[in-house]
Image (spheres, rainbow, N blue to C red):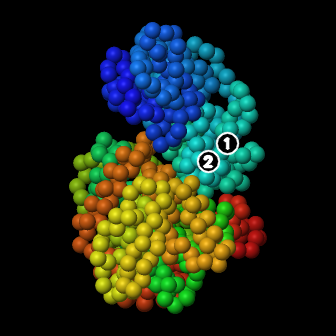
Amino acid sequence: MIHARINGIRVEVEEGTTVLDAAKKVNVKIPTLCKHPDLPPTAACGICMVQLKGTDKMIRSCCTEITEGMDIITLTPEIVEVRKTVLELILSNHPNACLTCARNQNCELQSLAAEFGIKEELFGKILKNLEIDDSIKTIVLEPQKCIKCGRCIQACQEMQNVWALSFAGRGLDTRIAPAADFTLVESPCVSCGQCAAYCPVGAIYVYDDTAKVWGALNDPSKHCVVQIAPAVRVAIGESFGMESGELKTGKLYTLLRRMGFQAVFDTNFGADVTIVEEATEFVKRLTKGGGVLPLISSCCPAWVDFMEKFHPDMIPNFSTCKSPHEILAALAKTYYALQLNIPPSSIFMVSIMPCIAKKFEIHRSREMFVSGYQDVNVSITTRELVRMIKQTGIDFSSLPDSEPDHMLADYSGGGTIFGVTGGVMEAALRSISSFLTGKPLGNIGLNDVRGLKGVKEARIKVGDYTLNVAVAHGLGNVEYVINKIRNAREKGEEPPYHFIEVMACPGGCIGGGGQPRNINDEVRRLRINGLYTDDSHCKYRDCHDNPQVKRLYAEFLGEYGSKKSYDILHTYYRHRKEYKSYRETEFLGESE
């Protein structure tokens, strides 16, 4: 342990603790701009300067480890002036576009400028005329607003191992850009959106599709329906002063009806259907040789795109099941349309997702048009929904709870935990156990696949089988799992796993790129706990026990894994070198 003083207050911390983190232990706030709790320090901004007592030496607290006997001063007129000057220099290279910026009133630079009382510009503006890149139609890169903190690059390269972003140029010409000055659509970007989640300003933000939703809601020829993902219900309250992890499912149902949607569905129902199909697929591969093992889950579109670009040799291992929101949308424009005698062409499906990559997924291949029309018309993020709520003037916090349209909304506990890392695996194993043994899984809470460890491995006894499973979250953790499979394959050995779950975003969907910002592991745990609480309160814990799922198969799909279910609920994959959708390849005359 290290013993030191901060502003005269004694502090005892573990060796290796930074001055910044030591200050937090004694409730001393040191302002930062480039530092994020999830990322290693870059010391890029210089705002976290503190002083060694008795000297003129100033140090950057985010990257300096506290040492025995160190005496730190964090607040003097000189320190305040240094920090203010650093901010003024940053602002001299930043456009005055707050009112039209995507981060207005939720910008770390704007907040610091207000805290330090910056009312005038003391330095002349040095602005470059840099083009906005919205080529990918999922995220937007506005390099003129970049403050060169490097957080997006750390997230893209070190956390996600995608390497779509880097610094280009030098000195005053330094800017954020895809490598080799490609556009985002030409880059390796998989639209996980972590760059946008970690950007402290408005240099990277979500492509806004809310106008399409408002347009449909105001079109009397449209039958507007909507679905909400599991992770949305435990995060949206944060934007309205509520605690992270609080379940707001009933309020969301009420809100969406008041906004004008004619039917309110729940993606959790789609997750239940995903599991019965995926568990059926796994059992066939395990017992009848109906495909290669390990089976890899395919619910995360950013992970699917990452696999298609970087690991195409794994395509045979991928489950052919669509993601839950695509499954529900396909059922809305087939089963629901048939039941209510509504033309599929008039149904306008909106998905509210924690995920930015869903914006690409909705038109990634012809299987996403199974009804003859685009199954999901628009996918918006949690943050986009928050903006829409504020535009309506509805007081979200005071809304009463209400019920959804049960036909495509009732869900099991297994469906709701899809929003957390390990949740897909746990839900699948619950059904796999029943399909293999005829009995429910004894340990309904699989602790070995829960939690925020980057890669979780477990051996699960299911009847006569011992299943080796792995769960990875954050794309930077995938290589470990993939390399183990490849090494076994090269040696002619049995695969190290039977089943693998991957989620692109740290924590799973609860940490998605489209969720409310200010994410860290504490917030992730609260959101995760909220979904596990929802699971524990569900009448049915196993996806295959959901009565509405049973009704769907009895009335419409037939058996699990039937030809009809395969035609509607499954997809295929290909080696995707660029970020081209089905519609783009069709337009270009390229073969699928």
Q: In percent of the image, x 29 and y 52: which residue is there? A: 246
Q: Residues within 10 Å of mark 2 (few under 14, many from 20)?
A: some
In the picture, residue 373 is in which quadrant? bottom right
Q: In percent of the image, x 34 and y 16: which residue is there? A: 8
Q: Nearer the viewer, residue 441 or 384?
A: 441
Identify the secondary structure beneath mark 2: helix
Task: State which quarter of the image contains the N terminus.
Answer: top left
Identify the secondary structure beneath mark 1: strand
Q: What amino acid is labelled 1 in the image? A: Ser
Task: State which quarter of the image contains the C terminus.
Answer: bottom right
Query: Residue 185, image x and y in percent?
Result: 68, 54
Residue behind mark 2 = 157
Task: Check the image and report above or below for 186 versus 198.
Answer: below
Mark 1 or 2, which is nearer the eye? 2
Query: CA–CA distance between discs 1 and 2?
Result: 8 Å
Query: Residue 344, image x and y in percent?
Result: 49, 76
Query: Residue 206, image x and y in percent?
Result: 54, 48
Residue behind mark 1 = 166
Query: Would you say 389 lies left or right of 317 here?
Result: left
Q: What amino acid is labelled 2 in the image? A: Gln
Judge whether residue 328 can be spotted in this image. Answer: no
Q: In percent of the image, x 65 and y 50: which residue is there? A: 163
Q: Are marks 1 and 2 in contact (CB under 8 Å)?
A: yes
Query: How many numbered circles does the render carry?
Result: 2
Q: Residue 231 got which mark?
A: none
Q: Earlier in the sequence, mark 1 or mark 2?
A: 2
Query: Would you say 310 lies left or right of 337 here?
Result: right
Query: Residue 320, image x and y in percent?
Result: 55, 77
